[in-house]
Image (tube, rainbow, N blue to C red):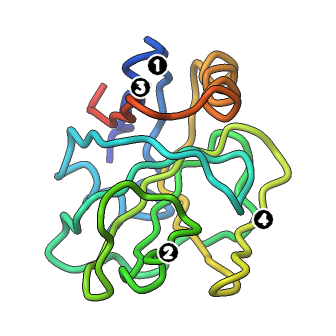
Amino acid sequence: MAERFLEIALAKRGVRCTAELLDDRAPRTCAAVWDALPLSGDVYHAKYARNEIYALFPPFAPTEPPLENPTVTPIPGDLCYFTFAGAELGTRAYGYDREVTPTATLVDLALFYERNNLLLNGDVGWVPGIVWGRVVEGLDTMAEACNDLWRTGAAGETLTFRRA
């Protein structure tokens, strides 16, 4: 299969980076995301995983991908895919500004921008993610924007994934 790339952007900050899909390591996940692009949503900065930004989406694949190419220690530039039941995210501690119902299923598409990440959540334990892509261009600029997002807030900012 030919290499496939996508653009990841923080709209308000005007920052973009380019990522390569890891079709050889996570083919089902890559196909699910690629077929659903473009995807855009409110951005959040992680509380537990550390150096991560992400957006939440309703499920977009006919069936959720299996846990392929998993990690609990993502490195800078990793794109991860998570599936959560609403009950896992429904506490006020997560700070979502919309209702997350216990029966909902949510897909979390995340970008890790710095090292020393550990996918261990105090509420649910280990949270392995599927590594489905890696940033190949623009990570330094994106990391600066992510740090700014952490320090000044995410309100009004969107995270977009689109084909490059």
Label 2 to label 4: alpha-carbon separation: 18 Å
Q: Are there few (<14), some (14-19), or many (20+) residues within 10 Å of tag 4?
A: some
Callout 1–callout 2 Cβ contact below 8 Å:
no
The residue sitting at 24% across, 43% down in the picture is 39
Residue carrying label 3: 9
Residue type, mark 3 in image? Ala
Q: Circle 4 is placed at which residue position? A: 118
User: Seen in the image, is 122 located left or right of residue 153?
Assistant: right
Query: Do the CB atoms of the residues marked 3 and 2 lie less than 8 Å apart?
Result: no
Which residue is denoted by mark 1 in the rendering? 16
Q: In what element is the residue under mark 3?
A: strand
In-front residue for pair 96/33: 96
Residue bearing the label numbered 2: 68
Q: In the rendered structure, which amino acid carries the disc numbered 2?
A: Glu
Q: Residue 161 location, x and y as percent? A: 33, 37
Asked whether the beta carbons under mark 4 and mark 1 sit within 8 Å of each other, the answer is no
Instruction: Point out residue 72 in the picture as x, y percentages from the top left corner.
Output: 71, 70
Q: In 3D space, how far apart are the residues under numbered discs 4 and 1 (Cα atoms)?
A: 25 Å
Q: Decide: marks 1, 3 in contact (CB < 8 A)?
A: yes
Q: Label 1 sits on what residue type?
A: Arg
For label 4, the SS is loop
Q: Residue at x 70, y 57 (%)?
A: 74
- Left or right position of 134 against 156: right
User: Residue shown at 70%/30% (left/top)?
Assistant: 151
